[in-house]
Image (tube, rainbow, N blue to C red):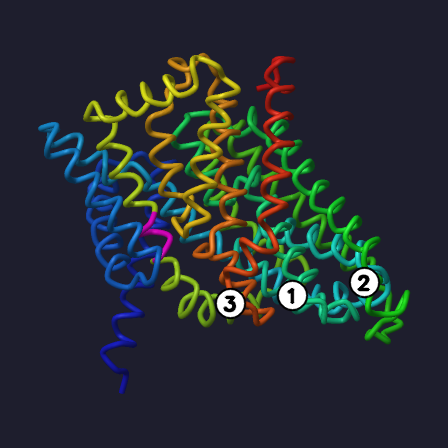
Amino acid sequence: MASAKDLLLVTRSAVTFCFGISFIANVFLKSPLLDSLNSGLMVAVVALSFVSSKGSARAIGTLLLFSGIVLLICSHAPLSAWGQALQENSQLVVMFITVPLLGIPIRCGGYGDSLREAFGRHAGTGARYYALVSVMTALLGVLLSIAAVPLSHEVSRTSCHCENKKLVSTALSRGFVTCMIWAPTSATIALVVQLTGVDWVDLFPSAFACALVAGAVGAFMACAGEKRKASPCAMGASKCCSDEPALPKIIELCVFFLVLIASIVGLSQMMGLSVIVAVAAASLFLPVVWMTCIGRLPVYEKEFRGDYFKRKLPSAGNQIALFVGAGFFAQGMSSSHVGDVLMGALAQVAGQSVLLLTVAVIGLVLATSAVGIHPVAIVAVAGGAMSASGCGITPTYAALVLSISWAMGNALCPASANVVAVSNLVGRSPIEVSLRWNGLYVLVASVVLVLVLTLLRSVGLA
């Protein structure tokens, strides 16, 4: 007989998934009846998510929610504003519900062995190992979010360099944050797009360029570090002895990645959907189509009923609580005059200089991240206060500043999911992984990225 805990888990998963399906369906049907149903389901999902959330996500989500409610009460906000606060980040909630489905083809599509073989064959030097791990983590991060970190770590264990804890840690954590700067499936970009109102297609070229720069800075530092210290394992050493070629499956995986991005862009541009809804819709249908094409649909069905329904959906409660809280806070900032006060303070500190404003926002996020405050809290505040028109900047520039701040803060914050996951994998403390091993990288990368932002703005690309 199922326990009460198991029954609650199944109920939470069923209600959450039904809300996701109903919301996406109503994007196309635009039914008043579904609107009412979705409002009721949203309330249930939010309540269940706050009950089931844990750790820093629950604390920050509750703080943002409480702060937003206080601001709404103090500003005597009308009932419509409260409804808008609840619905503010509903698209994000739906994305968190469906995006984990993208992980099923990656885990069960037969790509793991090929990736392991590639590492065994090609990760001969420390610099090459770093490059392969960081690029793989960045690409898989687009599809799997934080789950890309343990998967990349498992795959990379075929290289002799896996014993170098600092090298493994920096490759994983820095690789993951680069996808946060541009990927439409990342929570960072989803919230930043929501805050600034920028079109992701307009943001993509500049954001992707910044991600490449951030990745290049990490690779350069890894290469410089290897030159100062001899590699602990022999050139070309490998734990992999498979003779089966890995290239076809790796190409197949790259095709899946490109089809995903093309699907998101196509749904967004041709059907007029927001990029967040496009990501959610693509996550719902693309894995089914892909697994059917490669003859693994029964595996998909098994994983959907098992891992996705019993683990992935319940664990989405942390993100839902966090971003619903951020939605209430953003609406509270909008309904009150606090946003204007904060923006005035930022403008005064910056002295009407866009460069100083950029440094002030990024510096504030990094400083608070270093003491353990998750960057989402400060980005929500800065995003709610930063009026693009009032600061003399474009929505694209504002989005770039916020996404870079969050990504760099993520690598520096001891409480971020990225740092905690990596520290558990390498057996070192979050403080060592974040501040000690990533501190210099974050400082250098942030300075370089500020220069890149200045250059992009000067040529009219941001």
Coordinates of residue 134 in the picture (x, y in percent): 69, 52
First reached walking from the N terminus: tag 3 or tag 1: 1
Label 2 Cα crowd, 10 Å radius (few <14 / some 14-19 / many 20+): many
Tell which residue pokes out farthest to the bottom in this image: 1
Q: Of the residues shown, which amino acid type is indicated by label 1?
A: His
Decide if residue 429 is on the left or right side of residue 317.
right
Residue 113 at x, y percent in the picture: 74, 69
Helix, strand or loop for disc 1: helix
Q: Tell me the quadrant of the picture where the N terminus can be found.
A: bottom left
The residue under the point 48% across, 34% down is 363
Residue 246: image quadrant is: bottom right
Mark 2 and mark 1: span between their CA atoms? Answer: 14 Å
For mark 3, give the secondary structure.
helix
Q: Quadrant of residue 147?
A: bottom right
C-alpha distance separating marks 3 and 1:
26 Å
Measuring from the top left, give residue 293's x and y in whole percent: 66, 57
Question: What's the magenta region?
Answer: 318-322
Check disc 2 and give the amino acid type. Answer: Ala
Residue at point 79%, 50% (across, down): 223
Q: Nearer the viewer, residue 431 or 190?
A: 431
Is 44 positioned to the left or the right of 118 in the image?
left
Residue at image x 38%, y 13%? 390
According to the picture, the residue beneath numbered tag 3 turns out to be 301
| Placement of 265 over or under 158, stated as above or below | above
Q: Quadrant of the C terminus?
A: top right
Which numbered disc covers residue 153? 1
The residue labelled by disc 2 is 118
Above or below, 358 against 218 in this view is above
Evaluate if marks 2 and 1 touch, with contact meaning CB atoms under 8 Å apart: no
Q: Nearer the viewer, mark 3 or mark 1?
A: 1
Query: Which type of secondary structure does the marked residue at label 2 adopt?
Result: helix
